[in-house]
Amino acid sequence: MEMNMKKLLTMLMALMMVLALAACGNDTSAANNGGNEPSTPTNALEKIKASGELHVALSPDFSPMEFVDSSKSGQEQYVGFDISLAKFIAEELGVSLVIEPMSFDASQTAVYTSAVPMSISGYSWTEERAQNYELSDYYYAGDNETDQVLLIKAEDAAKYTKVEDFAGQDVGAQNASLQMQLLTEQIPDANPITIGDLAVGVMELKAGNIEALAVAKGNAEMIIDANPDLVICEFQFEVKAEYEANVILMTKGETELLEAVNAALAKAYESGLYGTWYDAAVELGKSENAKELTLD
């Protein structure tokens, strides 16, 4: 009886050792190849590739950079230079592009809070943006997007020609924009009026609620094409070199995505795509189907 008990204990101990070794072997295999479960993405770039989609926030009220083709619907309705750039970046990452339309300041907030990883919306470099976001290398849409001007009524062309003429006058600019910064710095005696949407700003100008609207020259030309009662003011803002081109906003700390985006920008530049995209966007912006979408 005692001998049988010893044999039984020996067999039980041997079985436990076999099971323990098998478990260790499985753990080692899982550690070596990740088991059957895919690894969890740890940064924005990995999440984009895992989902197969690049979500980009932008404000489609800024022709020819981003606007709406009313003859199309869904994602296809969003067009312009920045859309072409966003599509190119998505292709370079091997994913599909998803445009997230929202207001200009909401686009920046969405990136800051990581609601979306990226915004491409005609942004200029500013020190504040450099502190709060990962900013891409510069991309260059052309001189008309570098120059910053004031739109006024054609009937006021002789009335407003220099800085002093705007003293005490209401002048509009988009919230959190380079134009608002230039306005407050270079026309300090004007009353800066925050405009959430450029289409609304144009309506405010035409209605006489503001005397001028600060915009990029390329945008001004597209607006005038649709509104011949408006003109570009003789006064023009002085633009520092660091503000002359555009940058892409990405969530702070997402350096892997930043590196991938900069590589795509370099490839687009070397391929001479910027001029082609801009010319096509200008032509489309002059068509009867071109609309600037107003968003809250």
Image (cartoon, rainbow, N blue to C red):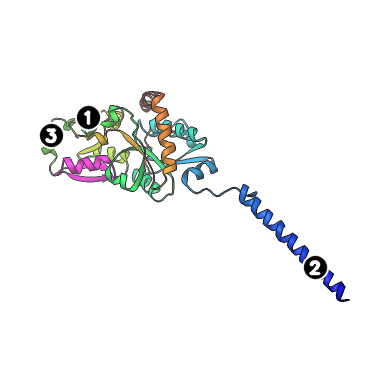
Q: Secondary structure at mark 3?
A: loop
Give how far apart the Cα atoms at labels 1 and 2 are: 98 Å
Quadrant hosting residue 102: top left
Confirm whether the magenta stretch covers residue 183: yes
Tell me whether the residue at label 1 lies in contact with that at label 2, contact meaning CB atoms closer than 8 angstroms: no
252, above or below 3, in the image: above
For this orientation, the residue located farthest to the right is: 1
Q: Secondary structure at mark 2?
A: helix
Crowding near the residue tagged with mark 1, few <14, some 14–19, many ≥20 C-alpha atoms within 10 Å: many
Quadrant hosting residue 175: top left
Q: Which residue is mark 3?
A: 162
Q: Amino acid at mark 3?
A: Lys
Nearer to me, 261 or 173: 261
Quadrant hosting residue 160: top left
Q: Which residue is mark 1?
A: 231
Of the numbered discs 3 and 1, the one sitting upstream in the chain is: 3
Q: Which mark lies nearer to you, 3 or 1?
A: 3
Horizontally, residue 169 falls left or right of residue 20, namely left
Q: Position of residue 286 (x, y in %)?
A: 35, 26
Of the numbered discs 2 and 3, the one sitting upstream in the chain is: 2
Q: Which residue is mark 2?
A: 10
Query: Who's the residue at 72% across and 56% down the image?
Result: 22
Specify start and end residues of the magenta stretch as a single range: 168-196
Horizontally, residue 207 falls left or right of residue 247, namely left
Nearer to me, 216 or 157: 216
Nearer to me, 163 or 55: 55
Give how far apart the Cα atoms at labels 2 and 3 are: 100 Å
